[in-house]
Amino acid sequence: MITRRALIRSTAAGAAVATLSSPAILLAQSWFREYPFKLGVASGDPASDGFVMWTRLAPEPFEPHGGVPMSALPVDWEVAEDDHFRTIVAKGTELARPELGHSVHAEVSGLKSDRPYWYRFTVGSDRSLTGRARTLPAAGAAVSQLRFGVCGCQHYESGFYTAYRDIAEDDLAFVYHYGDFIYEYSYDYNYGPERLPVPKVREHRLREVISLDDYRQHYAQYLMDLDLQAARSSQVFLQSFDDHEVQNNWVDDYAQDPTIPQEVFALRRQAAMQAWYENMPVRRRALPHGPLSLANRRFAFGDLASISVLDTRSFRSNQPCDDRWGVTPCEGVYDRNATVLGAAQEKWLDENLMRKDA
């Protein structure tokens, strides 16, 4: 039996649907079988008037496309001066595009310097957890001290992420992550302090990651760790990368295995760098063009300090001796023209170090 209340509710829902012209909006409201913000939220690349906010829709992270339809979905975002969102100071909408793993990188500006802000995302009827970010001090402002966190080299199978819970609970200006956010390989056992084998504390789902879909699922497994989510949602991050975001000891278009052709390895590197961008709170300028990402950038903290985040992999000379240790020096070991940063990035760093504004 259909009651009067049910009929009114059904009619109202039908009228609401009829007013929506975008299929993407319909999908956003009705598609997800599970919570779409399972990978959390994060903020990064702060400026004195803003920062970038990140999330990635993945209601079913290990299903094709994260369980999201192959459509661009509108995701709303808000920034407030308080954690209850009584004073909202900025808001907007970004499209979570399937080409970028349904990730969102929302850049906000026009905020006050050197203070915390709170942010959140909404898609359809689902809302993310609340994140906390912080703007930098104004240019040249007097800053007497700087308290920050540093982390990296976080192989999922080697240990739990309890240290990230401490980071989440601390009062920090920022967190610098120097890279190796993921490790692209698994192993059968690890070595303890006395070089004796010890068991893994948990398992990678994939033995090795190579394709873009592999990397997306691999990041999802790492990001579903709640301690890591707590840190990323509570602090603003300066994010870099090292080798394991792609492959152990890669440089430029050279794989660790010298028998892999450069043009073949370049495809893996391109997939890996796209996945890195999709999962990190970085600005659009870091979106890879082919395998290259503009990852070097500078952050100034008033008159006290500046930090130059470097790319130490993309422009590096190939490591001699096929990257072997403890061997007789081979050709290239004493090459005076060898570089880690590349000429252009070295010049950029030199100019930063010569600047007088910290």
Image: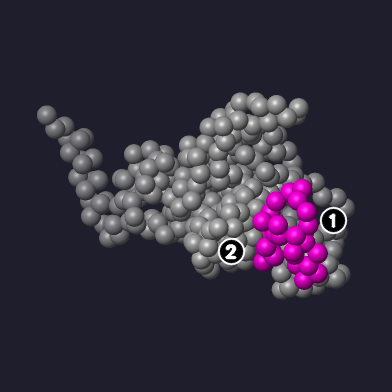
Instruction: State which quadrant residue 314 falls in.
Output: bottom right
Seen in the picture, residue 320 relative to 178 is either above or below; the reply is: below
Mark whose residue sits in front, 2 or 1: 2
Frontmost residue, 180 versus 255: 255
Residue 213 location (% of width, % of height): 43, 50
* Res 40 seen here: no
Residue 332 location (% of width, % of height): 75, 64
Seen in the picture, residue 221 relative to 89 is either above or below; the reply is: above
Q: Which residue is mark 1?
A: 143
The residue type indicated by label 2 comes to: Asp
Q: Residues within 10 Å of mark 1 (few under 14, many from 20)?
A: few
Q: Which mark is residue 253?
A: 2
Q: Is residue 194 left or right of residue 120?
A: right
Seen in the picture, residue 7 relative to 213 is either above or below; the reply is: above
Q: Tell me which residue sits at (62%, 46%) in the image.
A: 181
Instruction: State which quadrant residue 139 falls in.
Output: bottom right
Q: Magenta segment: does it hold 38?
A: no
